[in-house]
Amino acid sequence: MSKEQRAAARAMIAKGELGRTPQVQRDEFNVIFDLPLGDDVTLTPRTLGGVPALDVHVDGADGDAVIFYLHGGGYVIGSARTGANLAAPLARRTGLPAVSLDYRLAPENPFPAAVDDALAAYKDLLGSHDKIVIAGDSAGGGLALATMLAARRDGLPLPAAAVLFSPWTDLTLSGASLDTRGDYDPLFSRGHIQEYADLYLAGHDPKDELASPLLADLTGLPPLLIQVGSAEVLLDDALQLAVRAAEHEVDVSLDVVAGAPHVYPLNVGIMDEADEALDHAARFLGGAVA
């Protein structure tokens, strides 16, 4: 990644002021991340387990397995449409259809609403697909982990693999990078992450494993691919997850790109590493369902 690419990627995002209302943040986020998906992409509304979702179909992506995608946004902002920004290139590269979930958001619907919605949708997918892979970014990465933990608790078959882009896995906010990366992260500070945690938890114990899956026993989870940039306050959430997964005998791969911002694979066409990351993620997911 050249200095010019790094600067261009970082220039696309900037820290917002603390204390803005969720609706203001949602409106801004939806405008910024209304990214072009390509003429080969069709989005079709549907429901899964009673939860709104979007079928993300890319021409030619007709494989038997399905990608279950969970968007980021601190459990407060984002949508199935913003999730399609990564679900679509994954579908294109894997040849698999994808579905992006519109799970309920805080503060109107605090923990565990997002987990309940994701699990209900996952159960519905199990009824129609023998092979499922799961992916998510930021809070959606943590939610993907929580969904697998809830599925394991309920004795359900687990996905074949999971890709986690800059996952938020620790709502106790114990990671040192929340402070050491604060001046380097162009998007977030500890204060921003604390605001989202407070809105989502609404007083619930952050040590609950479905809120902070980093703290859970990860034994038995499927292979994980974690991708993160070094210019992130959530860097330690990814690094510690990789260590903990390995300690629990979970196959885990970790990609760290120096100088890359939060969820850097969104920077397709701007950062070479974004394209490389999605290519790696597609090989990983495709291999899991081959």
Image (cartoon, grey):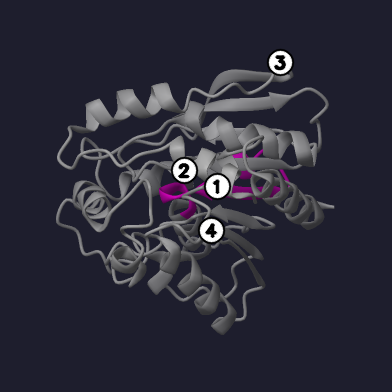
Contact check, label 1 and label 2, Cβ < 8 Å: yes
Residue 135 within the magenta-colored segment of the rendering: yes
How far is the residue under mark 1 from the one under mark 2? 6 Å
Q: Is residue 281 left or right of residue 181?
A: right
Q: Which residue is mark 1?
A: 6
Residue 148 within the magenta-colored segment of the rendering: no
Counting residues from the start of the chain, the first of labels 3 and 1 encountered is: 1
Q: Circle 1 sits in a helix, a strand or a loop, which is it? A: helix
Counting residues from the start of the chain, the first of labels 4 and 3 encountered is: 3
Q: Which residue is mark 3?
A: 39
Where's residue 55, x and y in %? 61, 26
Mark linked to residue 228:
4
Counting residues from the start of the chain, the first of labels 1 and 4 encountered is: 1
Counting residues from the start of the chain, the first of labels 3 and 2 encountered is: 2
Where's residue 166, x and y in %? 49, 55
How far is the residue under mark 4 from the one under mark 2? 14 Å
Residue 35: quarter of image: top right
**The magenta segment:** 125-141
Mark linked to residue 10:
2
Q: Circle 3 sits in a helix, a strand or a loop, which is it? A: loop
The type of residue carrying mark 2 is Arg
How far is the residue under mark 4 from the one under mark 3? 29 Å
The type of residue carrying mark 1 is Arg
How far is the residue under mark 3 from the one under mark 1? 28 Å
Contact check, label 3 and label 2, Cβ < 8 Å: no
